[in-house]
Amino acid sequence: MTKKPATQEAGAKGNAAPLKSKAAQTSSFSLVTPLLVVAAAVGWGKLAQRELQAETVEELVAKVSDRLSAQLNEFMDPSATEQQEQMLLEKCDDEKLIAMEVRHLVSDLSCSDEKYAASPLFDGKILPVQEPMQLEQPMGNDRVFFMLNGRNEGVYVSWNGEFNCVGKAAELAAGWLGADRDVMENGVRLYNQMGFAIRSAEDLAKAKNIVHILLDFQLWQWPGVEKGYQYVLEDGVVLTTVAMSPKVFDVQYFLTQNESEKIMELGMPGLSRSKVDGSNSSKITSKSRTSHTAFLEDSLFTRDFRVRAARVARLPSPTFAERLQLLQYNAGEFYRQHFDTFHSRDFLPKDANAFHYEDYEEWTKWAADKLRGLDQTQLPEEFREGGPLFPDVEDQQTFPNALLEVFHQKMTSTNMFKALFDEEYDRWLRINLDKDAVDLVKDLMDEKRRPSYLPLIVQAWEEKLGRGEFRYTFPKPQVNGQSHYYNWVRWAKERVSYLGDDCPPIARPNGYLYPQYTVEFQERLLDFVHDDYSKDFIIQMTNAEWYDWLMENRGRSLVLFQVLKSFPHFAELIIRTWESRVRSPLLRYKLPKYVKHFHPQRYVTLFMYLNNQTKIGGETVFPFALDRFSDEEIVRDGMDECSTGLAVPPRGLHASLFYTQTPEGDIDHMSRHGGCPPHEGTKWGSNAFMWDSDADEGAELWTTK
């Protein structure tokens, strides 16, 4: 285990195989060259050439071909593969698998130019990314075009040309574009349009000063740019934007025919009726899912897919990807609309992030004061003082109803009410707005109604106004112990990876105290607390009743889980207990003032279509998507949702990449999807589920009873 250089980029190397069929395999790589030549002709190849550091298309083709040749040789020589399979290392010893890219925070850089003050250019207008991309000449070092993670629009911000000062520009841009300022306090990172970290002035110049901002531990999310937009990755994999919301990409040249057949061969013996996530961390069969599935065993073959899938998604570590799952859909079998996420356990108290009418009042006063401080003639008329969209905390009718009208229009135009299965409040709002009801916001903010809509209401108003200085960050409640704990585990894992050989052996991936998300690791830490601290001290940290409960349940699962939910300060006690045993000043953690809640969860899915036997049916449907794959009307018996939204056909050796979380780390309600029944034949597919953390440990956390 060696310490990684600060400039090392994860995912810069690796093999994906753009082979379309068995015929392509036996005819060398005759199909690869035309593919990349055509790609370069329409402009895709420019991005791929930059990441592969190829000066010409011919050099790019040669590099991709070398990678494909190595992979093909592996499959053409079974004896070599069998020999490698015998050398499967324990996960904790497999450095290729556990490798982790370390964040590079530009907000930590020290700007020595005291006169430099970042400011938005062109009146702070929010522009589509196509504008800077289509410039005939690259922009100079006096400005940078910033976008948030996964977004397709941004703002120009002034820059003094010194890389150490770009963090100041990024922070201004992030706030202007609506980033949570409390999350921003924990660090800002920059990435180019191909998902690689910006670590130097040279990186920024290569990115043509067009960058994405990621906050704290946010994970990269591919921007869609526009429907039909294509990326060619460094190993020849091609991503094509199929839909913008939810974000869905078609993936080509990730999977070979040989690999497809091997996935089926390895998975078929374990096939059984598919199950869904039940209550109390159980798995149950359901009428909503009639297909058959099997997870493949751990092997060099499946580990290679974990590495490659994580590289396509630009995740920090291959451990974020699960082992492959094989799926079989016989004629008439289906999986109704669902999320790919787990949901059988509550990590936070129900009222942890509750909003109240007082929050609305505070925002209204803040926004009104900001508007009064501007030249009224520069504002849209309806936002001027006295206009219907000028915030007035005393007004119970005109402003609240105008505000909710803007919100309602946005929710209906984006299908969000439908995606939330909340058409009841779609109708409730429409009826009351048409009646010009009084106290409508106050009614909506009642705890029995929809107070959770408040941030979306404010966001709709902000977007309507279109001025970045009016992006509001709501005050936060005390951070829950669960949030602090899982954020610390995430930090500690990254820190261990960064330290390499400088990390104490006990805290390394094969060490007894290597930080993990598992329940077993939690209980180990809680045992240390019992050993290290007196009864009186633990009572002081909790109370007498909880101490008795702790003693009664010592050694059982999920005990610390419950304590952290109820006593936020217990998280720091757990962390300090671990530090006292690791005994390294390099592993001392400072609790942030605020952390956005995080716990292990699936983040993005790569669904591979292994065959093309299905002439009709077998689509992956996203019923709430506004985009459609084609204008063809689709009707599938047993699944009404297949006739709405986006239905992606199961084209053999293609894949669909789609996100189950937003770029900010919340569940994306637009990502509900289903597997439509094949009309005839059998559809074979394979899931590479990818998490926002270690996938094995996350699954253990969710499934431990």
Image (cartoon, grey):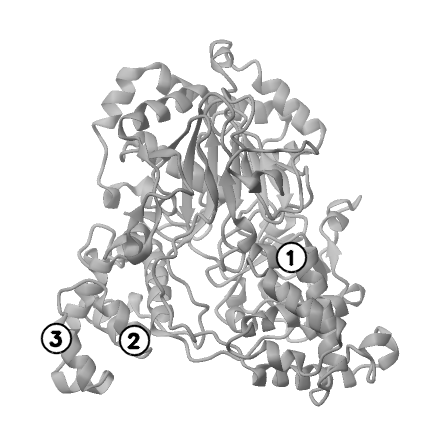
Q: Are marks 2 and 3 in contact (CB under 8 Å)?
A: no
Of callouts 3 and 1, the N-terminal one:
1
Q: CA distance from mark 2 to mark 1?
A: 35 Å
Report x, y in % for residue 117.
68, 73
Q: Residues within 10 Å of mark 1 (few under 14, many from 20)?
A: many
Amino acid at dot 1: Met
**Residue 418 in which image quadrant:** bottom right
Q: Is residue 291 above or below residue 591?
A: above
Considering only order in the chain, which callout, 3 or 2, is on the residue closer to the N terminus? 3
Counting other residues with Cα less than 10 Å from the Cα at mark 2, is it few (<14), some (14-19), or many (20 or more)? some
Amino acid identity at mark 3: Met
The answer to whether residue 520 shows anywhere in this view is: yes
* Distance (Cα) linking label 2 and label 3: 20 Å
Q: Looking at the rendering, which quadrant does residue 398 occupy?
A: bottom right
Q: Residue 222 at what x, y percent from top left?
A: 57, 47
Residue at mark 1: 147
Residue on which disc 3 sits: 551
Q: Decide if residue 175 is in sight here.
A: no
Label drawn at residue 572: 2
Disc on the earlier residue, 2 or 1: 1
Instruction: Name the residue at the right extreme.
Output: 377
Label 3 SS: helix
In the rendering, at what x and y percent does residue 383 appear? 80, 77
SS for dot 2: helix
289 on left or right of 20: left
**Label 3: how many residues lie within 10 Å, few (<14), some (14-19) or many (20+)?**
few
